Image (cartoon, helix red, strand yellow):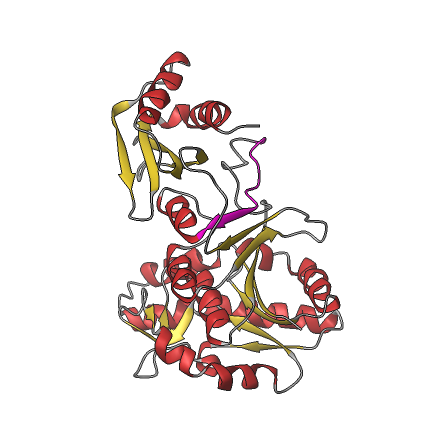
Amino acid sequence: MSLIVMKFGGECTARPKTIPVLVQQQIAEGHQVALVVSALAGDTDRLFSQMKDAGIEDRHTVADHVAKGEQNAAVLVARVLSDAGIPAQPWRARKFAIPAEGDPVYATVDMEKFCARGEQLLNELFSTNTLPVIAGYQGLNSEGKTVLLGRGGSDTSAVAIGCAIRADYVDFRKNGTNGIHTADPRLVPEARTIPRISYELMQAFAACGAKILAPDSLSIAKQESMALHVSGFSPEARQSTLVTVSDEIPAGRVIGITHRLGSSPGDPATVTTIGKELRLETAGAMAQILAEKDISVIGEPSRSDSAAGIGSITVAISPDCLKRAVSELHQAFIPR
């Protein structure tokens, strides 16, 4: 029997009736399952706005209030699962107690302390023979106060929990995607799913604008060698991506195109090619491809290379040209 942690994001928890079908598929395959959930789509921003509109700046008060989004989602999903014949129980920050320190809104998980409680946590989670539905994004500091784990913190908590209870892998279910794609499928419908990708390459994707997995979750997964499985929010989903220690992606080839909008309307957007040991001429090729399509590059391309040999080359363009630029670069660099 495999032990897996399933993570459902906000767009998934907002459509909770699909969740029991996906969970039952895993149970039918003989897996033992724990769930981690995000707040319903839009709830986190709404709760932060309530604090801002009320003029409340105390970070602990903000954290307590915003954490209700995930807590409510856990109650909702547990009820939907139970009504579907899968007995489930919601778990909140004070009940599960992920240890985290630092800024109350951007705290860091203490993985050494958390993993030391792993066996105890595992026993507690499954002692009542109900499926645990854990509120993500939150933990407790050494003073027993609720803290948040920063944006994307539900991803971070899911990976941290998976590592602590020694799950076989963490299963991320994402609405509107079938894994990690060679480009954003909303901009490039023909973008392909990457079957297997290393932690280092996935970190480069996240750093350059891809929002599939939170950067902190990838750091923990890499540190603890926790496999991550990314697939769609559909019972019929067949494609997926495994994020793990190594991949079979050859050096010198662009593996993906990412993008990022500017911080303010009208600011330049950026488009980035990512791969292993990218050649110097890739930057010139990017500029030439865009120029031939009357897409002007703003300034000079910037290059970044990691110690692991992961390379990225970024160009700035007008945001009005973003979709066309991503599509043209994808067509030029990603083999069909």
* Image location (x, y in percent) of residue 313: 32, 33
Q: How many marks?
A: 0
**Eyeballing the image, is 290 above or below 81?**
above
- The image position of residue 69, as x and y in percent, is 48, 66
252 to the left or right of 187: left
Q: Main secondary structure of the magenta part?
A: loop
Residue 126 visible in the picture: yes
Q: Quadrant of the N terminus?
A: bottom right
Q: Which residues are magenta?
A: 189-198
Position above or below: 322 against 144: above
**Residue visible at 46% across and 63% down in the picture:** 154
Q: Position of residue 47 (x, y in %)?
A: 42, 62
User: Is 190 a magenta residue?
Assistant: yes
Query: Please, is residue 154 above or below residue 276 in the view?
Result: below
Q: Is residue 265 visible?
A: no
When asked about the image quadrant of residue 31, the answer is bottom right
For the point 29% across and 48% down, the residue is 307
Q: Residue at x 50, y 24 (%)?
A: 331
